[in-house]
Amino acid sequence: MKKNIEFIISVLLIFITSNIIAQEARVTIRVADELGVVISNATVNAGFSTLIQPGWGWGGGKPNRVTGQTDTNGICILDGRGNGGSVGISAMKDSYYPSGGYCIDFTNLTGGVVKKWEPWNPTVEITLKKKVNPIPMYAKWVRDAMIPADGQPVGFDLMKGDWTQPQGRGENADIFFRLDRQPEREVMRYWGKQPRPQKLFDITLYVSFPNEGDGIRSVFIPLLAGGSSLHLPAVAPEKDYITNIVKRIYQTENQPSHSDVREDQNYFFRIRTKKDDKGNIVSAFYGKIYGDFSGFDYGKLTFRYYLNPTPNDRNMEFDPKRNLFKNLKSTEEVREP
């Protein structure tokens, strides 16, 4: 009887262990530059998700990390184990911007004691952007800055990183922000047979610019797709800037809430534009914003910007070691993510 119990326990342990540990996966990564030229000797990292393994105790898991190098064909093949059903992949090399956020979700397990994830050995294409000319920039993460006034434009000086006087230290209004908030009210809404209060609100942020030729241009970057840490193109566009945008967040009765703030939103902008008598731009400053304008539903403003200090230079590569803002708080610091 004792031997039968021991045999059953052994079988169960083999079954459990095989399902927890021996779930193998293989991925092939091909790394190239923006022109499609393969890159050798790039470092590739893969994290095979693992929920939990024997001996870890209770709690969540951690990825099983595997590292390799690309060969002369830009190829790296990585094998790993994990029971989480997915793998995250990144690549990097000196003189290139790292690229990450690539993910493969496995769909099936095959095999007996040693199980293999399917699809087996899928290929992931990764593009590394070359570092051409990272430069000093005014780079700042404005976080939860209280908007000084409602219902009227308030200027923000991007080279000072502050509201214009008298609300702040700024001297030139590069961007105007106007916050309009309708009075909040509550109504009773029925969830089944139970009445519950629903708060109704309507908040709008108007973003505009003071000079003819100034403006902003939207760029959308899908969040789920992997990509370079240099999210946007390395050079700001020369044309197609619009003079204003409107962001609105509201809740109307018996309707889902609505927000114009988008997680995939990014921008280029042009400020301090000067034109000749024929309407041609002779001088302007260019910059970029990672993410959207947010926080205004609480009367505050959050946005992350990078401004090239040289007139007419559209280079958008930021050197984080040469930020033109000094002594920033840790919450205000930015890097080329």
Image (cartoon, rainbow, N blue to C red):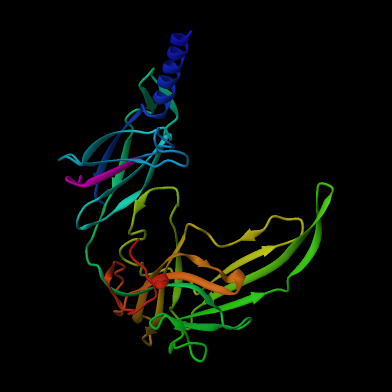
Does the stretch in magenta take in 32?
A: no
Start and end of the magenta stretch?
35-47
Residue 326 percent location from the top left of the image:
32, 80
Closest to the observer: 237 or 154?
154
Q: Report the predominant secondary structure element of the magenta stretch.
A: loop
Does the stretch in magenta take in 41?
A: yes
| 104 on left or right of 255 | left
Picture residue at 58% right of the left edge, 71% below the top = 296
Whether residue 211 is visible here, answered yes or no, is no
Tell me the quarter of the image containing the C terminus.
bottom left
Q: Is residue 189 above or below residue 192?
A: below
Residue 90 percent location from the top left of the image:
31, 47
Residue 111 percent location from the top left of the image:
38, 19
Residue at the farthest front position = 2
The quadrant holding residue 185 is bottom right
Picture residue at 43% right of the left edge, 90% below the top = 171
Q: Is residue 135 above or below residue 1?
A: below
Whether residue 314 is visible here, answered yes or no, is yes
| 43 on left or right of 287 | left
Picture residue at 80% right of the left edge, 62% below the top = 187
The quadrant holding residue 334 is bottom left
| 10 on left or right of 42 | right
Residue at the farthest bottom position = 166
Q: How many marks?
A: 0
Picture residue at 49% right of the left edge, 91% below the top = 165
Closest to the observer: 114 or 145?
114
| 156 on left or right of 153 | left
Residue at the farthest left position = 72
Residue 306 percent location from the top left of the image:
37, 71
Closest to the observer: 171 or 54?
54
